[in-house]
Image (cartoon, grey):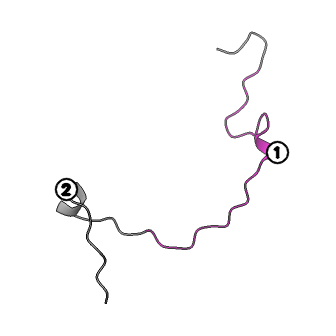
Amino acid sequence: MPKPGTRRPGPKQPHGTESNHKQHFSKNEAPPVPEIQGAAKSGKKHAGPMKKS
């Protein structure tokens, strides 16, 4: 609960120090990595070495 007499700032508006520390990240252009499927995902066995193609 806020103190009596204080207004509650909107969640979309910056308040406090949030507006002072804007992060400048470029957009990630890499596609997401596909998730492993089936028994390899749910087992406890460690992965083997990668096969050379």
Taking 4 as reference, is 43 left or right?
Answer: left
Q: Residue at x 76, y 41 (%)?
A: 18
Image coordinates for residue 46, horizontal then vertical, percent: 25, 61
Mark 1–mark 2 Cα distance, whole angstroms, equals 46 Å
Q: Against 42, is 49 above or below?
A: below
Image coordinates for residue 27, horizontal then vertical, percent: 63, 67
Taking 32 as reference, is 21 left or right?
Answer: right
User: In the image, what residue type sits under mark 1?
Assistant: Asn
Name the residue that disc number 1 marks: 20
Taking 30 as reference, is 37 left or right?
Answer: left
Q: Residue at x 31, y 87 (%)?
A: 52
Image coordinates for residue 38, horizontal then vertical, percent: 19, 62
Taking 51 as reference, is 11 left or right?
Answer: right
Residue 41 visible, this orientation: yes
Give 3 or 28, whichever is nearer the viewer: 28
Give 32 or 43, whichever is nearer the viewer: 43
Tell me which corner region of the image, top left, top right, bottom left or bottom right, holds residue 6: top right
Crowdedness of circle 1 by 10 Å Cα count: few (<14), some, many (20+)?
few
Residue 38 visible, this orientation: no
- 40 part of magenta stretch: no
Bounds of the magenta span?
7-32
Please tell me which of labels 1 and 2 falls first in the chain.
1
Q: Main secondary structure of the magenta part?
A: loop
Name the residue that disc number 2 marks: 43
User: In the image, what residue type sits under mark 2?
Assistant: Gly
Image coordinates for residue 11, horizontal then vertical, percent: 67, 35
Q: Against 11, is 44 above or below?
A: below
- 10 part of magenta stretch: yes
**SS of the residue under disc 1:** helix
Crowdedness of circle 2 by 10 Å Cα count: few (<14), some, many (20+)?
few
